[in-house]
Amino acid sequence: MSDMLYEAPGTLRAALALLSGANGKARVMAGGTDLLIQMRSGRIEPELLVDIKHIPDLRAIALKRGGFQFGSAVTCMELIEHEAFARAWPGVIDGVKLIGSIQVKGRATVGGNVCNASPAADSVPALIAAGALARIVGPDGKRDVPVEDIPTGPGKTSLASGEIVVSFILPKRLPRSGDAYLRFIPRTEMDIAVVGAGVNLTLDRRGFCTLARVSLGAVAERALLVSEAAAALVGTKVDDAALRQLAAAASAACRPIDDKRGTKEFRFKVAGVLARRAAEIALQRAGRKN
Amino acid sequence: MSTMIKYEEKDLKVVGTRPLRPDGVDKVTGRARFGADYSLPGQLIGKVLRSPHAHARIKSIDTSKAEALPGVKAVVTRDDFAEMPVEFALSGELTVNFHDVTRNMMAREKVYYDGHPVAAVAATSESIARKALGLIEVEYEVLPHVIDVLEAMKPDAPLLHEEQYTEGVTPRPDKPSNLAKRMVFSRGDVEAGFRQADVIIEREFNTKPVHQGYIEPQACLASYTEDGQADLWTASQGHFVIRSQCAKVLQMEVSKLRVMPTELGGGFGGKNNIYNEPLAIALSRKSHRPVKMVMTREEVFRATGPTSGANVRIKMGCTRDGRITAAHAELNFQAGAFPGSSVAMAAMCTFTRYDLEHARVVANDVTVNRPKVAAYRAPGAPIAVFGVESVIDEMAKKLGIDPIEFRLRNAAREGTQTYYGPKFGPIGYVQTLEQARAHPHYSAPLGPNQGRGVATGFWFNIGSETSSTINVNEDGTVTLMIGTVDVAGGSRAAMAMMVAEELGIDVDKVRPIIGDTSSMGFNFITAGSRGTFASGMACVAATRQAIDKLRQRVAQIREVPVEAVLWKDGHAVPAGGEAGQFAPMSLADVAKVAGRTGGTIAGHAEINAQGAGPGFGTHIVDVEVDKQTGLIKILRYTVVQDVGKAIHPAYVEGQLQGGAVQGIGWALNEEYVYGDDGVLQNPGFLDYRVPVASDVPFIDTVIVEVPNPNHPYGVRGCGEVPIIAPMAAIANAVENAIGIRLCEQPMSPPRVLKAIDDAAGAKA
Ligand SMILES: Cc1cc2nc3c(=O)[nH]c(=O)nc-3n(C[C@H](O)[C@H](O)[C@H](O)COP(=O)(O)OP(=O)(O)OC[C@H]3O[C@@H](n4cnc5c(N)ncnc54)[C@H](O)[C@@H]3O)c2cc1C
């Protein structure tokens, strides 16, 4: 590796200036749990690392206009330990909790998980199901983008050069809502999702589903928002027939590959199974008084 | 020196207790020095250029640009190593051929697998060395390759070695092939046996190559001097064998090469062979600087030996009352790029747990475009046994006989004639079966989608060349020099305990160390479960020699005949009777005056240990199968094993647990995944899935002790047996849970789910 500069600016403005001055040879670093591994393996050779963990705004978790907003440099452990957030979005926490070990989560961020753009990233389907927006700031100003529009393929995002994700904005939580995320791995931990499924739903007073969002990970080149699967739930009591339809729609939405982690055939099947299981947990959580 | 010390029953004070291991504190505080922890002033970093092709002819290698890069101090290729004739030597349980060893460490005419070394560079930094690798120009003529063992056996398969004619078949084939060798082990008349059978079951099984999964990648440091001497630090299971192999391929005199053992971060059979060591020495010779080489995990996977993947066919017959009448097996093992898999070992372990009149095993050793296989814990045995124990389970089920009862009806016992050679002395197979049957695990209730399986394993255990020295220090403490590497199982503790027991002193008064190759006589590798058996015997022999010297010294000091002096509880005491009275002397008393009464007291032994005691084990496992995802969860696991004598029971339990966990990994998820291009796709622990701690329950152990009559404390060895049964036990449990017999390993979720769907499809 050739010489590399490391900077840890204290303001967003300084971070943006550093990035725009590096003509594409710079990388944002949050926890570094993906970045350092990619550097070590020789996959990337950045000339400048811009560490965003010292920017106070990027480390805050706050309730704004009834909805949660958290900074992109908030670590996974900070999010998990934030009780109010965890109560509102248990499914997002399901995903975040699965990222590596406690030590890894002590450094890793949701921002890094999204921007690393792995199709198997565990927090991403849960965030998509939650309807989260990412706030992006760059040389041309600020924009809010649904999380599903950020990763575009393995290792690729829709971020323009010099842009930073600064925070994630979740919608105001309605009563009788619940979300859940499940992933399939052949082991119990320290593995990478072969299939991931996030489901978020809201019920009316009579128990009919009024809103639903379903997202699948690791079954395509990026995490998918599967509206057909969500449609299978809306207007139902999330009964067996609806869950079957949900599973079928989830399987149908997959466009997986055969690889060392699992066969296509397996991913089709398990996507349906997990979507259903996640919906069952989300349903149970929605029925819980909170 | 006698090479056998007989077992004597006696009251034990140290053996059988659980003291802390001598290497324990260093390991938990991070002080222990493993291979990569050694450095020398001025050292260079060595890196290897590896083949990107599974099979190719090397047309040319141009290193000039790499040599010109500032910071590069030496480059070596095939031209720096001598051609080696065909010459065989033992290396662990397997045999190596130096003609192939030299080609495996550095390709000559052809590259035979993705990762095969082609050149090595030593430079002042790792990044320069890496850059230099990119500057080496190799021109390849890419050849068709073959990865699968059955494909490789086909007549029109791509051929690895043009000069390889199958050994062991008559007449000699007129064409070369990938079938390197065929061996047949047989007893009785198998066809006649099948005619007596009421039930015959024939099945085919397939397994994938698996890696030993040691945590420490291979690492070494070499320093070659201008007068032709070399020092080598390397993480291996047997530094004397590493010395022999390096001296041979580098054409050095053995005395000029000194090999220092390091702490070993796991080996399990994978660290019996040379890889980077001769390259590091050659680079040091060329650069006049010490050279350090540490493999990356990717290199470990691509280029060091896993165990074989295999195709196994088993046919067995039995009578209605569950007596096996005939057994036949065909074992087709991948040897990797060069011949010499563990198929012969596997063949001898296939049916050995049973008393069979008619048995035959045909063993085929097949070359394929994969890294040359190495030993892995009970080399080969788990593969063959997976098939046999599955078929036995099926026979028992068919006849409605309890699977342990079925095995008891056919079990090998003392006096049983094996089909491969020896007749068994005292063995504990029946005891392991009986204790498993009596264990609460065997009768515990099971829930839905849960099942229980049983399987058993046999391993020879081995002895071989071993030496040991004890030095009594001036304060009465003892330094014990062992020549067999402690492969992290805790054998140093066990040796120190046997020495303490013999001397009648506390175990913390014995400090065991592993000697280097220049400080003691030759020691064979720690392999085949020989460490505590063979090295233990050498330590006892060395201690008994020291005790004889202590008695002589006391006789001289006290002016009594030597027969009047008895060594008891750490003291020289009067033998009693007519022989003469004197004031007893402790070990410390003698040590204090030893220097001025004739010199320090030491004992040493150089033996070729014989009489290893065969080991047997019975495993019980409960699983739960998620029928919608194919995930198998291990709920409960019990290992019952005859170890002869557990010198340090905690470390014996550790061996039984570790073996079972490695077997669970083999059964569930571990496999090498190759692309159509013959390139390994999962060279790392993310996608080569060994079990993590939360994947396995606490492994319960039951130690059975049927003493080996040929060891002073009855030791058999215990490291290999526990990895043999898990694959079959888990497959049997899965069958018990969901009624589907899986004949392919690993039983990963995609395979299991497919089997479930296929079975449902067949029913519909
Ligand atoms: C042992 C281990 C286990 C793991 N297990 C899992 C797992 O189970 N599931 C899982 O999903 N992941 C896992 N990971 C991967 C990794 O930890 C996660 O993806 C993590 O969330 C990355 O966050 P980070 O802050 O460390 O990102 P970094 O490594 O800092 O950054 C990752 C990428 O995102 C970019 N980036 C980071 N922040 C921003 C931002 N605010 N704006 C723009 N670009 C940005 C970086 O430039 C880089 O390209 C594991 C990693 C390790 C080492």
Image (cartoon, helix red, strand yellow):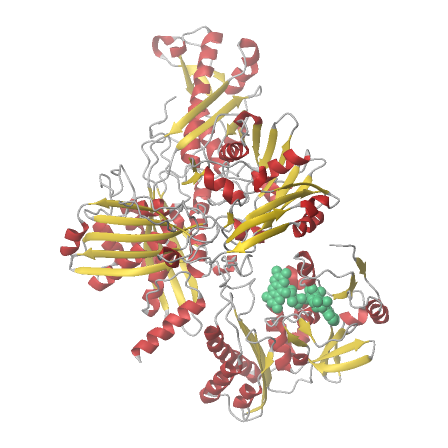
Front residue of B733/B148: it is B148
Residue A102 seen in this snapshot: no
From the viewer's perspective, tell me whether residue A240 is left or right of residue A192.
Answer: left
**In the image, residue A185 lies at what x, y percent?**
51, 67
Vertical placement of B129 versus A86: above or below? Answer: above
Instruction: Using the rendered view, name the quadrant where residue B740 is placed.
Output: bottom left
Vertical placement of A245 versus B274: above or below? Answer: below
Q: Quadrant of the N terminus of chain A?
A: bottom right
Q: Quadrant of the C terminus of chain A?
A: bottom right
**In the image, residue B99 lies at what x, y percent?**
46, 39
Q: Residue at x 54, y 92 (%)?
A: A208
Instruction: Using the rendered view, name the quadrant where residue B544 is placed.
Output: top left
Vertical placement of A148 versus B371: above or below? Answer: below
**In the image, residue B446 lies at what x, y percent?**
35, 66
Front residue of B202/A84: it is B202
From the viewer's perspective, tell me whether residue A212 is left or right of residue B402.
Answer: right
Residue A183 seen in this snapshot: yes
